[in-house]
Image (cartoon, rainbow, N blue to C red):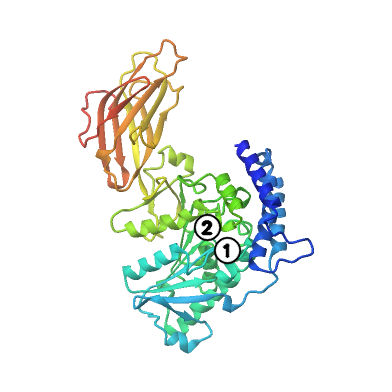
Amino acid sequence: MMKLLLLLQAVLAAVATSPLKLQPTQNQRPSTRLERLDHFQHKFTAFHVQHLTDASYEDKTEEEYLQLWKNYEEIGQKLSSSREPSPEDVVFELFTRTSSFVYERLRSTDFNGLKNSSFDSTKDTVVLIHGFLEDADLAPWMQTLKRFFLEKKEQNVIIVQWAQLADVSNYYAAARDVSFVGVELGKLLSALKRAAGLSEKRTHLIGFSLGAHVAGIAGQHFPGISRISGLDPAGPYFSRRDIDERLDHTDAKFVDVIHTNYGGLLKLHFGYEDALGHVDFYVNGGSLQPGCPPIVKEAIEMFLSGDIRDFSSCNHDRSYIYYIEAARKSLVYTTLGFQCPDYQNFTMGECLRNHTNTLGLQASPTKPGVYYLDTQDSAPYLSREVEVHIIIGTVNHTTVGELKLTNYPLDRHSETLELASLYHRYKSGEHLLGMLTVPQESSILDLPLQLRFQRNLWDILGNNKLEVEELRLTEVQYHRSYFACNLQLESRKWTTATLSRRRCPATSIFQ
């Protein structure tokens, strides 16, 4: 890891001192948008690399960490533009089934324009709000959701285009303007209610990153909104703000949140860690997503290209990717989250019998709480969790060793579950529990399951074989179980387990 960090430091130092880079002098104020972007990246590099490559960074106290963050935030604030936002910087675009490609611009100050618009108060209203460095007209996730909602049924889709404030080189300038955009959206919704009969009970705001906080502030200025969905709400700048400056569960009748990238901007994580809604889903733990490239690799590529937009924020973006996939599959599959004290307990399979809630549009406000779920590392991402239950057969003498289960062929990328460590001592009739994450489209009966026992070599007189009396996989949401019986495992060899719906014979006193 340190070699990668040192490489990153060397690369960034070279980029920062390159004569091809346009670096404003101390007395020269960046004038063009490109110069402001470059100036911000230079400051970002100088500060971030200093601490990213500090070997003792992880050992810093909370007080030292907060001081680092304060210093970093001050850099952003000093670089903030003095230009005040204007209502003209925020454009509200109305789309309907009859006008799904060309929008009508809505203005909160134009009563007659709102009254005579294509807005239909008898239909539901969905509002989509983008985040930092995004342009609503170019953001694929917004265009995809717009098409989904309009194809699903006749309804009003309003896209909030605030690229003039969000698509800037300084994150803190954009974060500062979130309140302004949220207030403007609140004004529009209030005006639509007066002029065209918009109903709070039929209004759903969906915001990504900074856009999630825009939705929250809009909800504060237009009370009674039915629902707000926050897709990985931004953490930097907002983590120490009061609830009237960010998204909170009081901003709508129902607030559901998906977390995919919390951890702090100093670690190049962009999401909000704490629960913000009535229902919060922490996907794959909520910080890092499987299949996303290492953060250091992304940072190197960003600075080599010279454009901050080349930082893909893969983990952050997964929030809307999961949301869209869940929406598209909602008629066929249900993506469940499981209520659990923490992610570690969830991965150990200890929460699969707890309360569940559905990720995405079908999330229920009647089951508040924090929920966890895992995904695959490539599309299609959404999965279902399967409970693994193993009953050990008769153990005649000391048997110590590791037990693993995999659900993929060994010549491909495999997901392996460790059911017992290398130092585990087995007992007759012992029960072992775990959890597998399998693709939603897969059939449990078709899973190529294999078990592997590895004896601990330090246990010289130990048994080289292990009997598994019953392997049971249970789809908790469907109350269906699948069985493999009387498996004889030999150390260091993979043994195939063929599942069936037939229960294992009750021949053992341990069943």
Instruction: Name the side, left or right, on which 37 lies relative to 144.
Output: right
Task: Please provide percent x and percent y for residue 160.
Answer: 50, 72
Q: What residue is at 25 percent from the left and 37 percent from the top?
A: 482
Visible in this render: residue 193? Answer: yes
Instruction: Assign a secondary structure to mark 1.
Output: loop
Label number found at residue 276: 2
Q: Mark 2 and 1 residues: CB-CB less than 8 Å, in contact?
A: yes
Task: Please provide percent x and percent y for residue 26.
Answer: 78, 61
Instruction: Assign a secondary structure to mark 2.
Output: loop
- Is the N terminus in the top left, top right, bottom left or bottom right quadrant? top right
Q: Quadrant of residue 30?
A: bottom right
Task: Please provide percent x and percent y for residue 324.
Answer: 39, 59
Towards the viewer: 366 or 362:
362
Q: Is residue 190 above or below residue 481?
A: below
Count of marks, rendered view: 2
Instruction: Name the side, left or right, on which 246 lies relative to 31.
Output: left
Question: Which amino acid, mark 1?
Answer: Arg
Q: What residue is at 47 percent from the left and 80 percent from the top?
A: 105
Label number found at residue 246: 1
Badge 1, how many Cα within 10 Å: few under 14, some, many 20+? many
